[in-house]
Structures are given as C-alpha cells and as structure tokens.
Amino acid sequence: MPDGLQGAAAEGTSARLLSRLADAGVDQSVSISARKPDWMRARFKITDDYRRLKRTLRDLDLVTVCEEAGCPNIFECWSDGTATFMINGERCTRACGFCLVDTRHPQALDPGEPERVAEAVLRMDLAHAVVTAVARDDLGDGGAAAFAATIRAVRARRPGTAVEVLIPDCKGDPDALGVIFDARPDVLNHNMETVARLQRAVRPSASYARSLAVLARAKEVGLVTKSSLIVGLGETDDEVVEVLADLAAVGCDIVTVGQYLRPTTHHLPVVRWWTPDELSRVAAIGEAMGIGHVEASPLTRSSYHARQSASAVRDTPVAVGRPG
C-alpha cells in the first residue's frame, strides 16, 4: 500500500477499499482529523420550517437521504421546505465506498410508502419534490415499480408538483428502466458519481458505461436528464472534463458537482480539497459544452438547488408554492 494511504488505514479504512484506490493510481489522502478548508463549513441554523418538516417526516414514517447520507446542506434545504425522500427502505444492497447509507440485509417493501410520500408533498406544499432510493438488487425490477407508484401518487395528490427522481441503474435492465421512464418524471437523475478510472474503487457494483447508457436511454424517450459527480477522491482535472464531455454527448441537461466529505473513518479518504474557484471553472466548462445547467460548488450535492436547476433548463420556470 502506498505510504500516502497508510494514514487512512490507521484511521480505520479497510484494506480492501484502500487497495482498490491504490490499484486506480491513488497514492495519497487527507486525514479525517485535518482541519477542513473554511469553504467546507456548512451553515447550521435550525428554523421553524426545519422543525415542521422534520415533524411531518416522522409523523408519516418517511426517510430522507438528507439524513441517511449525512448531507451538509440539510439545514438550508429543510429550512427552504425542500427534502429528498428515500423510498424502498433504508438498506442498500450495494456498499459504495463514499456512502453512509445502511448496507445490512434489506427489508420488504412498504406498499403504503408512495401514498405517504404524496401526503408529505401535499402537507409541505412542495412545488418540486425529489424522490430517490437505495439500490435494491434483490428485487427483480430493482425497485422501479415503487418509483413509478410514487410519481403517480404525488401527481394524484398534488398535480402542480414537479417530480424529480434520482434512480439506481436497475442493473441496466431496459424493462425495469422503462417502468420508470413511462411514469414520465419531470427530471430523471442518475449519478455517475466519479470518473471512469475510479469507478471500481468508489462504486464497485456499478459501471461507468452502464450509467451513461441509463442517461442516454432516458434522453431518447424525451426526459429531462441529470447526473452528479463527487470530486476529491483522486481524480484529475482532465478526467472531470472528460466526464462532462461524456454527459454532454448523451444530452444530459443538468449536472451537479460537489466536494466529497468522508462520512466516517471506515469510508474512502478525501484525497484533495477542490476550491470554489476551481469548481466554478468546472461549471463554466460544462455549460460551454452544451449542458444546460451545471451546479458546482464545494457543498453541492445531487439534489442541492434541485428546483432552481430544473427551472434553469425549462422554457418556463418552476413556480414556488402551490399554483393558484
């Protein structure tokens, strides 16, 4: 193992994760105890809107990726009345090296979950709802039917709400993906997560080519498409530009790019802190390639400013609040 990764090993990152990084050519890391740059400090402010949203989610026994993944923007987004609902349970069948979500054996699906998500959207008066899920490789359709049911439930309860879905790859199964596509979400999001060289190290059960194919298929059927990239895992500037070029080539409309934050000592280490100026240049490069909107900043996550990003690529802006 390279000397530059020995510190991460001592902190608790598994030899398996670190060997994959080393195999991908990564030979250094930042200690989890090292002081983070000032620009990585999220604003902490608990407001009445935050408390109201939290009560609604608990009352309806719903899970958000905001909580499960330890998102640094939770206070800002919840105070703005925005949350990303996580369906199909809390346990993921994949074990990506960056993710905090539970990976124990998954439980049975809850058939009442789509209606409870719709009820939450109604109570929260959302103009733009984001729905994601854990990967469910144990299910024949990868959880696709639940996405479709949730889209239909939200539209039945609050027809004015735009529905964005952040989906797993469903193992690339065209029939499963077709179930989601046929439900016509307003935005179809599937994340690339990292550059091609680091795929096996970062998300060994996924595939760079498969993820691009998911986005290409969604675009072919006329959906607004979106993807996300985490930086700071050992990629180069040129590799980030290559991902943007690949996304532009399949017609991706929206891309989000944000700095990786190590959730625990057992996860992949941070290799580099990208500066706000560097990420601003990434956004400019992506939009110059023809991507409709690139949201890039240190604290950007896949669903950050989701409503605003969707508005940026639509002919008419997404309205705030309930339509009159």
Image (cartoon, rainbow, N blue to C red):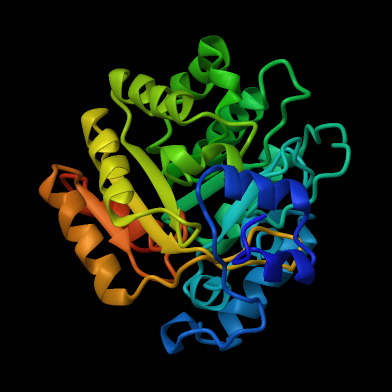
Identify which residue, 22 or 198, lies in the foreground: 22
Return the x and y of residue 47 as percentages of the image width and height: 58, 86
Does residue 101 appear in the picture of this structure?
Answer: yes
Return the x and y of residue 304 as percentages of the image width and height: 43, 62
- Residue at left offset 64%, top offset 31%: 205
- Residue at left offset 46%, top offset 29%: 211
- Compared with 63, 275 (above or below) is below
Identify which residue, 195 or 1, lies in the foreground: 1
Does residue 323 appear in the picture of this structure?
Answer: no
Quadrant of the rendering where the N terminus is positioned: bottom right
Q: Which residue of the protein is positioned furthest toward the top in this rendering? A: 175
- Residue at left offset 80%, top offset 65%: 12
- Residue at left offset 63%, top offset 35%: 204
Occupied quadrant, residue 263: bottom right
Say left or right for 192 vs 58: left
Question: How many numbered badges does the structure rendering display?
Answer: 0
